[in-house]
Image (cartoon, coloured by chain):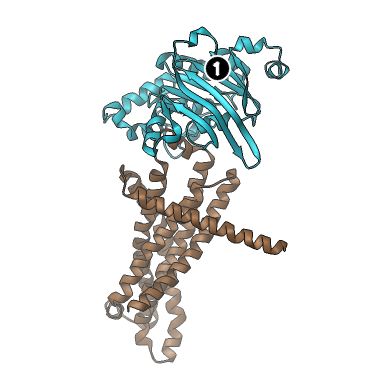
Amino acid sequence: MKLLNTLIRSVLNYLEELGQLSRFAGKFFREVVRRPFEGRELLRQCYNMGNKSLLLVGVTGFIIGLVFTLQSRPKMLELGAAAWLPSMVSISIVREIGPIITALICAGRIGSGIGAELGSMRVTEQIDAMEVSGTNPFKYLVVTRILATTLMIPILVVMSDAIALFGSFLVESIKGDVSFRLYFDEVFASLDFIDIIPATLKTFFFGFAIGLVGSFRGYYCKHGTAGVGVAANTAVVETSMLLFVLDFLAVMVTDIFY
Amino acid sequence: MPKNPIYENRKPVITIRGLKKTFGQNAVLNGFDMDLYEGETLVIMGKSGSGKSVMIKCLIGLETHDAGTINIMGRDMENVSEDELRDIRTEVGFLFQGSALYDSMTVRENLEFPLRRHKRKFGGISDTTPMVIEVLESVGLAHAIDLMPEELSGGMKRRIALARTLILRPRIILYDEPTTGLDPITSKEIVLLMKSIQQKYSTSSIVITHDVDCARFISDRMILLVDGVNYAEGTFAELDASADPKVQAFFKS
Protein backbone atom coordinates (compact mmCIF):
# COMPACT_ATOMS: atom_id res chain seq x y z
CA MET A 1 0.00 0.00 0.00
CA LYS A 2 2.81 2.35 0.96
CA LEU A 3 4.64 1.49 -2.26
CA LEU A 4 1.50 2.18 -4.28
CA ASN A 5 1.04 5.56 -2.59
CA THR A 6 4.65 6.47 -3.33
CA LEU A 7 4.19 5.42 -6.93
CA ILE A 8 0.98 7.44 -7.31
CA ARG A 9 2.63 10.47 -5.72
CA SER A 10 5.62 10.18 -8.07
CA VAL A 11 3.37 9.95 -11.12
CA LEU A 12 1.32 12.94 -9.96
CA ASN A 13 4.49 14.97 -9.30
CA TYR A 14 5.79 14.02 -12.73
CA LEU A 15 2.53 15.09 -14.40
CA GLU A 16 2.49 18.33 -12.43
CA GLU A 17 6.04 19.15 -13.53
CA LEU A 18 5.16 18.27 -17.11
CA GLY A 19 2.24 20.71 -16.88
CA GLN A 20 4.50 23.43 -15.47
CA LEU A 21 7.03 22.82 -18.25
CA SER A 22 4.24 23.11 -20.85
CA ARG A 23 3.06 26.39 -19.30
CA PHE A 24 6.67 27.60 -19.31
CA ALA A 25 6.95 26.75 -23.01
CA GLY A 26 3.63 28.50 -23.65
CA LYS A 27 4.91 31.61 -21.89
CA PHE A 28 8.02 31.51 -24.10
CA PHE A 29 5.88 31.56 -27.27
CA ARG A 30 3.77 34.44 -25.91
CA GLU A 31 6.78 36.51 -24.85
CA VAL A 32 8.96 35.87 -27.88
CA VAL A 33 6.72 37.94 -30.14
CA ARG A 34 6.20 40.81 -27.67
CA ARG A 35 8.30 43.95 -27.43
CA PRO A 36 10.88 44.86 -26.25
CA PHE A 37 13.17 42.46 -28.12
CA GLU A 38 16.37 41.85 -26.21
CA GLY A 39 18.57 41.71 -29.33
CA ARG A 40 21.84 42.56 -27.63
CA GLU A 41 21.41 39.90 -24.96
CA LEU A 42 20.37 37.36 -27.62
CA LEU A 43 23.57 38.03 -29.59
CA ARG A 44 25.63 37.77 -26.40
CA GLN A 45 24.05 34.43 -25.57
CA CYS A 46 24.54 33.14 -29.14
CA TYR A 47 28.19 34.16 -29.01
CA ASN A 48 28.75 32.59 -25.59
CA MET A 49 27.03 29.34 -26.47
CA GLY A 50 28.48 29.00 -29.95
CA ASN A 51 31.99 30.25 -29.35
CA LYS A 52 32.54 28.51 -26.05
CA SER A 53 31.11 25.17 -27.20
CA LEU A 54 32.91 25.08 -30.54
CA LEU A 55 36.14 23.50 -29.27
CA LEU A 56 34.37 20.76 -27.33
CA VAL A 57 31.95 20.02 -30.16
CA GLY A 58 34.75 20.12 -32.74
CA VAL A 59 37.06 17.78 -30.82
CA THR A 60 34.20 15.35 -30.17
CA GLY A 61 33.16 15.41 -33.83
CA PHE A 62 36.74 14.83 -34.95
CA ILE A 63 37.19 11.86 -32.60
CA ILE A 64 33.85 10.37 -33.66
CA GLY A 65 34.85 10.60 -37.32
CA LEU A 66 38.23 9.00 -36.61
CA VAL A 67 36.95 6.22 -34.39
CA PHE A 68 33.90 5.42 -36.47
CA THR A 69 36.01 5.01 -39.59
CA LEU A 70 38.73 3.06 -37.79
CA GLN A 71 36.15 0.68 -36.32
CA SER A 72 34.12 0.07 -39.47
CA ARG A 73 36.94 0.00 -42.03
CA PRO A 74 38.22 -3.56 -41.38
CA LYS A 75 34.70 -5.02 -41.66
CA MET A 76 34.00 -3.08 -44.85
CA LEU A 77 37.28 -4.32 -46.34
CA GLU A 78 36.40 -7.87 -45.36
CA LEU A 79 33.06 -7.55 -47.16
CA GLY A 80 34.73 -5.97 -50.17
CA ALA A 81 32.78 -2.76 -49.65
CA ALA A 82 35.60 -0.34 -48.86
CA ALA A 83 34.37 1.98 -51.61
CA TRP A 84 31.14 2.41 -49.70
CA LEU A 85 32.87 3.63 -46.56
CA PRO A 86 32.55 7.40 -47.26
CA SER A 87 28.84 6.96 -48.03
CA MET A 88 28.19 4.91 -44.91
CA VAL A 89 30.12 7.25 -42.65
CA SER A 90 28.56 10.41 -44.09
CA ILE A 91 24.97 9.14 -43.91
CA SER A 92 25.46 7.86 -40.35
CA ILE A 93 27.07 11.06 -39.17
CA VAL A 94 24.77 13.52 -40.92
CA ARG A 95 21.51 11.70 -40.21
CA GLU A 96 22.07 10.47 -36.69
CA ILE A 97 25.40 10.42 -34.92
CA GLY A 98 26.35 14.07 -35.47
CA PRO A 99 23.05 15.62 -34.34
CA ILE A 100 22.44 13.43 -31.31
CA ILE A 101 26.01 13.39 -29.98
CA THR A 102 26.41 17.15 -30.45
CA ALA A 103 23.05 17.77 -28.80
CA LEU A 104 23.96 15.54 -25.86
CA ILE A 105 27.27 17.34 -25.41
CA CYS A 106 25.48 20.69 -25.57
CA ALA A 107 22.89 19.45 -23.07
CA GLY A 108 25.78 18.80 -20.71
CA ARG A 109 27.65 21.99 -21.39
CA ILE A 110 25.00 24.57 -22.25
CA GLY A 111 21.92 23.08 -20.53
CA SER A 112 23.68 22.64 -17.19
CA GLY A 113 25.21 26.11 -17.56
CA ILE A 114 21.81 27.70 -18.06
CA GLY A 115 20.33 25.72 -15.15
CA ALA A 116 23.18 26.71 -12.82
CA GLU A 117 23.30 30.37 -13.90
CA LEU A 118 19.58 31.01 -13.63
CA GLY A 119 19.37 28.91 -10.46
CA SER A 120 22.09 30.95 -8.84
CA MET A 121 20.36 34.17 -9.93
CA ARG A 122 17.12 32.89 -8.41
CA VAL A 123 18.56 31.97 -5.02
CA THR A 124 20.51 35.23 -4.73
CA GLU A 125 17.32 37.17 -5.55
CA GLN A 126 18.77 38.65 -8.76
CA ILE A 127 15.71 37.53 -10.71
CA ASP A 128 13.46 39.12 -8.06
CA ALA A 129 15.56 42.29 -8.34
CA MET A 130 14.91 42.39 -12.09
CA GLU A 131 11.20 41.92 -11.49
CA VAL A 132 10.91 44.69 -8.92
CA SER A 133 12.77 47.09 -11.19
CA GLY A 134 9.91 46.74 -13.65
CA THR A 135 11.89 44.56 -16.05
CA ASN A 136 10.58 41.31 -17.47
CA PRO A 137 13.21 38.75 -16.36
CA PHE A 138 11.52 35.97 -18.31
CA LYS A 139 12.05 37.87 -21.51
CA TYR A 140 15.58 38.96 -20.72
CA LEU A 141 16.86 35.69 -19.26
CA VAL A 142 14.69 32.87 -20.58
CA VAL A 143 13.52 33.95 -24.03
CA THR A 144 17.03 34.97 -25.09
CA ARG A 145 18.57 31.70 -23.89
CA ILE A 146 15.98 29.45 -25.51
CA LEU A 147 16.25 31.39 -28.78
CA ALA A 148 20.04 31.23 -28.63
CA THR A 149 20.13 27.45 -28.14
CA THR A 150 17.51 26.97 -30.86
CA LEU A 151 19.64 28.96 -33.30
CA MET A 152 23.10 27.80 -32.26
CA ILE A 153 22.67 24.03 -31.88
CA PRO A 154 21.98 23.52 -35.63
CA ILE A 155 25.09 25.55 -36.47
CA LEU A 156 27.19 23.56 -34.01
CA VAL A 157 25.81 20.30 -35.43
CA VAL A 158 26.71 21.31 -38.99
CA MET A 159 30.23 22.19 -37.84
CA SER A 160 30.54 18.99 -35.86
CA ASP A 161 29.39 16.93 -38.88
CA ALA A 162 31.93 18.64 -41.12
CA ILE A 163 34.76 18.06 -38.64
CA ALA A 164 33.70 14.42 -38.12
CA LEU A 165 33.79 13.84 -41.88
CA PHE A 166 37.21 15.43 -42.02
CA GLY A 167 38.35 13.06 -39.25
CA SER A 168 36.99 10.14 -41.23
CA PHE A 169 38.81 11.36 -44.33
CA LEU A 170 42.10 11.52 -42.40
CA VAL A 171 41.82 7.83 -41.48
CA GLU A 172 40.92 6.92 -45.04
CA SER A 173 43.75 8.96 -46.51
CA ILE A 174 46.31 7.44 -44.15
CA LYS A 175 45.10 3.85 -44.40
CA GLY A 176 43.63 3.75 -47.87
CA ASP A 177 45.41 6.44 -49.81
CA VAL A 178 42.24 8.30 -50.84
CA SER A 179 42.42 11.90 -52.03
CA PHE A 180 40.46 14.70 -50.35
CA ARG A 181 38.54 15.38 -53.56
CA LEU A 182 37.61 11.74 -54.17
CA TYR A 183 36.55 11.18 -50.58
CA PHE A 184 34.28 14.20 -50.43
CA ASP A 185 32.91 13.56 -53.93
CA GLU A 186 31.76 10.22 -52.57
CA VAL A 187 30.39 11.85 -49.42
CA PHE A 188 28.30 14.43 -51.29
CA ALA A 189 27.18 11.98 -53.94
CA SER A 190 25.65 9.75 -51.29
CA LEU A 191 23.88 12.52 -49.36
CA ASP A 192 20.40 13.55 -50.47
CA PHE A 193 18.15 16.30 -49.25
CA ILE A 194 16.15 13.68 -47.35
CA ASP A 195 19.29 12.99 -45.36
CA ILE A 196 20.14 16.60 -44.67
CA ILE A 197 16.81 18.41 -44.22
CA PRO A 198 15.12 16.24 -41.56
CA ALA A 199 18.44 15.90 -39.73
CA THR A 200 18.87 19.68 -39.69
CA LEU A 201 15.27 20.38 -38.77
CA LYS A 202 15.40 18.13 -35.74
CA THR A 203 18.44 19.99 -34.42
CA PHE A 204 16.27 23.11 -34.01
CA PHE A 205 14.01 21.04 -31.75
CA PHE A 206 17.05 19.70 -29.91
CA GLY A 207 18.26 23.26 -29.34
CA PHE A 208 14.82 24.34 -28.16
CA ALA A 209 14.68 21.41 -25.71
CA ILE A 210 18.12 22.20 -24.28
CA GLY A 211 17.24 25.87 -23.71
CA LEU A 212 13.74 25.13 -22.44
CA VAL A 213 14.61 22.50 -19.82
CA GLY A 214 17.77 24.30 -18.64
CA SER A 215 15.88 27.58 -18.25
CA PHE A 216 12.88 25.91 -16.59
CA ARG A 217 15.01 24.14 -13.99
CA GLY A 218 17.10 27.24 -13.25
CA TYR A 219 14.27 29.76 -13.26
CA TYR A 220 12.24 27.83 -10.67
CA CYS A 221 15.24 26.71 -8.63
CA LYS A 222 14.55 26.32 -4.88
CA HIS A 223 16.36 25.35 -1.69
CA GLY A 224 19.43 27.60 -1.81
CA THR A 225 22.82 26.70 -3.18
CA ALA A 226 22.13 22.96 -2.99
CA GLY A 227 19.16 23.64 -5.27
CA VAL A 228 21.47 25.20 -7.87
CA GLY A 229 23.39 21.92 -8.18
CA VAL A 230 20.14 19.99 -8.40
CA ALA A 231 18.84 22.38 -11.08
CA ALA A 232 21.98 21.96 -13.20
CA ASN A 233 22.00 18.20 -12.79
CA THR A 234 18.29 17.75 -13.44
CA ALA A 235 18.54 19.95 -16.52
CA VAL A 236 21.14 17.63 -18.05
CA VAL A 237 19.35 14.39 -17.17
CA GLU A 238 15.93 15.54 -18.34
CA THR A 239 17.25 17.19 -21.49
CA SER A 240 19.18 14.04 -22.45
CA MET A 241 16.04 11.93 -22.07
CA LEU A 242 14.00 14.46 -23.99
CA LEU A 243 16.58 14.49 -26.80
CA PHE A 244 16.25 10.73 -27.27
CA VAL A 245 12.45 11.00 -27.34
CA LEU A 246 12.63 13.85 -29.87
CA ASP A 247 15.12 11.91 -31.97
CA PHE A 248 12.85 8.88 -32.00
CA LEU A 249 9.87 11.04 -33.00
CA ALA A 250 11.92 12.73 -35.73
CA VAL A 251 12.90 9.36 -37.18
CA MET A 252 9.25 8.19 -37.09
CA VAL A 253 8.04 11.35 -38.84
CA THR A 254 10.83 11.15 -41.44
CA ASP A 255 9.87 7.53 -42.12
CA ILE A 256 6.26 8.55 -42.78
CA PHE A 257 7.14 11.23 -45.29
CA TYR A 258 10.06 9.59 -47.07
CA MET B 1 -4.15 53.57 12.04
CA PRO B 2 -2.28 56.59 13.47
CA LYS B 3 -4.35 58.97 15.57
CA ASN B 4 -1.62 61.60 15.44
CA PRO B 5 -3.00 64.84 13.87
CA ILE B 6 0.11 65.28 11.72
CA TYR B 7 -1.26 62.49 9.52
CA GLU B 8 -4.71 64.04 9.11
CA ASN B 9 -3.95 66.08 6.00
CA ARG B 10 -1.60 63.57 4.44
CA LYS B 11 -2.78 60.87 2.10
CA PRO B 12 -1.55 57.31 2.25
CA VAL B 13 0.55 56.13 -0.69
CA ILE B 14 0.17 52.53 0.39
CA THR B 15 -2.81 50.99 2.14
CA ILE B 16 -2.96 47.37 3.26
CA ARG B 17 -6.04 45.81 4.82
CA GLY B 18 -6.52 42.33 6.24
CA LEU B 19 -3.46 40.82 4.54
CA LYS B 20 -3.20 37.05 4.96
CA LYS B 21 -0.56 34.67 3.74
CA THR B 22 -0.09 31.01 4.55
CA PHE B 23 2.72 28.63 3.58
CA GLY B 24 1.33 25.10 3.91
CA GLN B 25 0.06 24.87 7.50
CA ASN B 26 2.04 27.92 8.61
CA ALA B 27 -0.01 31.12 8.70
CA VAL B 28 2.58 33.89 8.39
CA LEU B 29 0.28 36.90 8.02
CA ASN B 30 -3.05 36.86 9.82
CA GLY B 31 -4.81 40.05 8.77
CA PHE B 32 -2.10 42.68 8.67
CA ASP B 33 -3.18 46.33 8.25
CA MET B 34 -0.96 49.25 7.34
CA ASP B 35 -0.94 52.75 5.89
CA LEU B 36 2.18 54.46 4.58
CA TYR B 37 1.85 58.22 4.30
CA GLU B 38 3.56 60.45 1.79
CA GLY B 39 7.06 61.38 2.87
CA GLU B 40 7.11 59.26 6.01
CA THR B 41 9.47 56.49 7.05
CA LEU B 42 7.62 53.56 8.57
CA VAL B 43 9.68 50.96 10.38
CA ILE B 44 8.26 47.47 10.76
CA MET B 45 9.89 45.39 13.43
CA GLY B 46 9.30 41.84 14.48
CA LYS B 47 11.06 38.61 15.34
CA SER B 48 12.56 36.45 12.61
CA GLY B 49 9.76 34.56 10.91
CA SER B 50 7.11 37.05 11.99
CA GLY B 51 6.20 37.76 8.37
CA LYS B 52 7.92 41.11 7.78
CA SER B 53 9.74 40.15 4.59
CA VAL B 54 6.76 38.17 3.32
CA MET B 55 4.62 41.28 3.81
CA ILE B 56 6.80 43.52 1.63
CA LYS B 57 7.17 40.78 -0.97
CA CYS B 58 3.37 40.58 -1.13
CA LEU B 59 3.31 44.35 -1.40
CA ILE B 60 5.50 44.41 -4.50
CA GLY B 61 3.97 41.29 -6.03
CA LEU B 62 6.88 38.88 -5.50
CA GLU B 63 4.54 36.74 -3.38
CA THR B 64 0.83 36.36 -3.91
CA HIS B 65 -1.29 36.94 -0.82
CA ASP B 66 -4.18 34.66 0.13
CA ALA B 67 -6.61 37.38 1.31
CA GLY B 68 -6.78 41.10 1.96
CA THR B 69 -6.22 44.17 -0.19
CA ILE B 70 -3.16 46.17 -1.18
CA ASN B 71 -3.48 49.60 -2.70
CA ILE B 72 -0.41 51.42 -4.00
CA MET B 73 -0.80 55.05 -5.07
CA GLY B 74 -4.50 54.55 -5.74
CA ARG B 75 -4.18 51.29 -7.65
CA ASP B 76 -5.49 47.99 -6.30
CA MET B 77 -2.77 45.40 -6.76
CA GLU B 78 -5.33 42.62 -7.16
CA ASN B 79 -6.65 44.13 -10.39
CA VAL B 80 -3.52 45.31 -12.19
CA SER B 81 -2.27 43.79 -15.43
CA GLU B 82 1.35 42.68 -15.85
CA ASP B 83 2.21 45.90 -17.69
CA GLU B 84 0.55 48.05 -14.99
CA LEU B 85 2.43 46.09 -12.34
CA ARG B 86 5.71 46.91 -14.10
CA ASP B 87 4.76 50.59 -14.16
CA ILE B 88 3.98 50.52 -10.43
CA ARG B 89 7.30 48.82 -9.77
CA THR B 90 9.19 51.70 -11.34
CA GLU B 91 7.60 53.91 -8.65
CA VAL B 92 8.42 51.51 -5.81
CA GLY B 93 12.08 50.72 -5.22
CA PHE B 94 13.14 47.63 -3.31
CA LEU B 95 16.44 47.16 -1.49
CA PHE B 96 17.11 43.47 -0.96
CA GLN B 97 18.67 42.12 2.20
CA GLY B 98 21.43 40.44 0.19
CA SER B 99 21.79 43.42 -2.19
CA ALA B 100 20.97 41.15 -5.19
CA LEU B 101 23.39 42.87 -7.56
CA TYR B 102 23.63 41.25 -11.00
CA ASP B 103 26.97 39.52 -10.57
CA SER B 104 27.77 39.20 -14.28
CA MET B 105 27.51 42.98 -14.78
CA THR B 106 29.70 45.89 -13.68
CA VAL B 107 28.32 48.52 -11.31
CA ARG B 108 27.59 50.77 -14.30
CA GLU B 109 25.68 47.98 -16.09
CA ASN B 110 23.78 47.16 -12.90
CA LEU B 111 22.54 50.74 -12.79
CA GLU B 112 21.94 51.08 -16.52
CA PHE B 113 19.97 47.85 -16.67
CA PRO B 114 16.67 49.18 -15.23
CA LEU B 115 17.25 52.60 -16.75
CA ARG B 116 17.52 51.36 -20.34
CA ARG B 117 14.22 49.55 -19.99
CA HIS B 118 12.40 52.60 -18.69
CA LYS B 119 13.84 55.33 -20.92
CA ARG B 120 10.33 56.58 -21.59
CA LYS B 121 9.99 57.67 -17.98
CA PHE B 122 12.97 59.99 -18.49
CA GLY B 123 11.98 61.38 -21.89
CA GLY B 124 13.80 58.73 -23.94
CA ILE B 125 17.32 59.68 -22.81
CA SER B 126 20.12 58.16 -24.87
CA ASP B 127 23.09 58.90 -22.60
CA THR B 128 22.52 57.26 -19.23
CA THR B 129 25.99 58.04 -17.83
CA PRO B 130 25.10 61.37 -16.11
CA MET B 131 22.22 59.71 -14.25
CA VAL B 132 24.38 56.77 -13.25
CA ILE B 133 27.09 59.06 -11.95
CA GLU B 134 24.59 61.22 -10.09
CA VAL B 135 23.12 58.34 -8.09
CA LEU B 136 26.55 56.85 -7.48
CA GLU B 137 27.62 60.20 -6.06
CA SER B 138 24.51 60.17 -3.86
CA VAL B 139 25.75 56.96 -2.27
CA GLY B 140 29.39 58.09 -2.28
CA LEU B 141 30.67 55.45 -4.69
CA ALA B 142 31.21 57.20 -8.03
CA HIS B 143 34.73 55.72 -8.15
CA ALA B 144 33.33 52.17 -8.16
CA ILE B 145 31.52 52.60 -11.47
CA ASP B 146 33.58 50.03 -13.40
CA LEU B 147 34.01 47.47 -10.64
CA MET B 148 32.36 44.06 -10.61
CA PRO B 149 30.10 43.17 -7.62
CA GLU B 150 32.63 40.56 -6.44
CA GLU B 151 35.16 43.35 -5.95
CA LEU B 152 32.89 45.23 -3.52
CA SER B 153 32.60 44.88 0.26
CA GLY B 154 29.24 44.11 1.91
CA GLY B 155 28.61 47.77 2.72
CA MET B 156 29.55 48.89 -0.79
CA LYS B 157 27.22 46.29 -2.30
CA ARG B 158 24.37 47.61 -0.16
CA ARG B 159 25.12 51.18 -1.32
CA ILE B 160 25.26 50.18 -4.98
CA ALA B 161 22.00 48.28 -4.55
CA LEU B 162 20.52 51.44 -3.08
CA ALA B 163 21.85 53.45 -6.04
CA ARG B 164 20.22 50.96 -8.40
CA THR B 165 16.96 51.37 -6.52
CA LEU B 166 17.23 55.16 -6.75
CA ILE B 167 18.03 55.36 -10.43
CA LEU B 168 14.39 54.98 -11.45
CA ARG B 169 13.47 57.86 -9.10
CA PRO B 170 10.94 55.86 -7.07
CA ARG B 171 8.38 57.61 -4.89
CA ILE B 172 8.48 54.79 -2.36
CA ILE B 173 11.43 52.67 -1.22
CA LEU B 174 11.07 49.34 0.56
CA TYR B 175 14.12 48.32 2.60
CA ASP B 176 14.37 44.65 3.55
CA GLU B 177 16.69 44.51 6.58
CA PRO B 178 19.14 47.09 5.20
CA THR B 179 21.72 46.71 7.99
CA THR B 180 21.64 42.96 8.51
CA GLY B 181 25.04 41.31 8.13
CA LEU B 182 26.96 44.58 8.32
CA ASP B 183 29.34 45.71 11.06
CA PRO B 184 28.06 48.48 13.41
CA ILE B 185 30.03 51.25 11.69
CA THR B 186 28.89 50.30 8.18
CA SER B 187 25.33 49.85 9.49
CA LYS B 188 25.41 53.39 10.83
CA GLU B 189 26.70 54.67 7.49
CA ILE B 190 23.88 52.91 5.66
CA VAL B 191 21.26 54.32 8.03
CA LEU B 192 22.65 57.84 7.59
CA LEU B 193 22.63 57.33 3.85
CA MET B 194 18.99 56.20 3.94
CA LYS B 195 18.07 59.31 5.88
CA SER B 196 19.92 61.64 3.50
CA ILE B 197 18.36 59.94 0.48
CA GLN B 198 14.91 60.28 1.97
CA GLN B 199 15.50 63.99 2.43
CA LYS B 200 17.10 64.50 -0.99
CA TYR B 201 14.57 62.57 -3.06
CA SER B 202 11.49 63.07 -0.78
CA THR B 203 10.64 59.39 -0.84
CA SER B 204 8.28 57.49 1.43
CA SER B 205 9.90 54.44 2.96
CA ILE B 206 9.07 51.16 4.63
CA VAL B 207 12.01 49.74 6.54
CA ILE B 208 11.92 46.12 7.68
CA THR B 209 14.47 45.64 10.43
CA HIS B 210 15.22 44.26 13.86
CA ASP B 211 18.00 46.78 14.39
CA VAL B 212 16.68 48.98 17.23
CA ASP B 213 19.33 51.67 16.65
CA CYS B 214 18.36 51.88 12.99
CA ALA B 215 14.68 52.16 13.96
CA ARG B 216 15.40 54.87 16.54
CA PHE B 217 17.29 57.01 14.06
CA ILE B 218 15.19 56.64 10.96
CA SER B 219 11.57 55.99 11.93
CA ASP B 220 8.74 58.49 11.88
CA ARG B 221 6.40 55.72 12.98
CA MET B 222 6.74 52.05 13.83
CA ILE B 223 4.67 48.90 13.68
CA LEU B 224 5.53 45.88 15.77
CA LEU B 225 4.56 42.71 13.95
CA VAL B 226 3.76 39.72 16.17
CA ASP B 227 2.19 36.49 14.89
CA GLY B 228 1.31 38.08 11.57
CA VAL B 229 -0.70 41.02 12.93
CA ASN B 230 0.12 44.60 14.01
CA TYR B 231 0.70 44.08 17.70
CA ALA B 232 1.69 47.64 18.52
CA GLU B 233 1.99 50.89 16.61
CA GLY B 234 3.35 54.36 17.36
CA THR B 235 6.48 56.45 17.33
CA PHE B 236 9.75 54.98 18.56
CA ALA B 237 9.43 56.91 21.84
CA GLU B 238 5.87 55.65 22.39
CA LEU B 239 6.77 52.02 21.83
CA ASP B 240 9.96 52.33 23.82
CA ALA B 241 7.92 53.64 26.76
CA SER B 242 5.30 50.90 26.47
CA ALA B 243 4.77 48.70 29.51
CA ASP B 244 3.65 45.76 27.37
CA PRO B 245 6.04 42.86 28.01
CA LYS B 246 6.09 41.77 24.35
CA VAL B 247 7.03 45.26 23.22
CA GLN B 248 9.53 45.64 26.01
CA ALA B 249 11.13 42.31 25.13
CA PHE B 250 11.97 43.80 21.81
CA PHE B 251 13.30 47.14 22.91
CA LYS B 252 15.25 46.01 25.94
CA SER B 253 16.83 42.96 24.30
The colour assigned to chain A within the rendered structure: brown
Q: Foreground residue, B153 or A37?
A: A37
Residue B47 place in picture, x, y as percent: 66, 26
Residue shown at 41% from the left, 14% from the top: B200
- Judged left or right of residue B213, residue A200 is left
Q: Foreground residue, A169 or B98?
A: B98
The colour assigned to chain B within the rendered structure: cyan
Q: Is residue A152 above or below residue A258?
A: above
Classify the position of the N terminus of chain B by image quarter: top right
Residue shown at 59% from the left, 26% from the top: B180
State the residue position of label 1: B1
Name the secondary structure under disc 1: loop
Residue shown at 30% from the left, 81% from the top: A190
The type of residue carrying mark 1 is Met
Classify the position of the C terminus of chain B by image quarter: top right
Question: Does residue B117 show up?
Answer: yes
- Judged left or right of residue A59, residue B57 is right
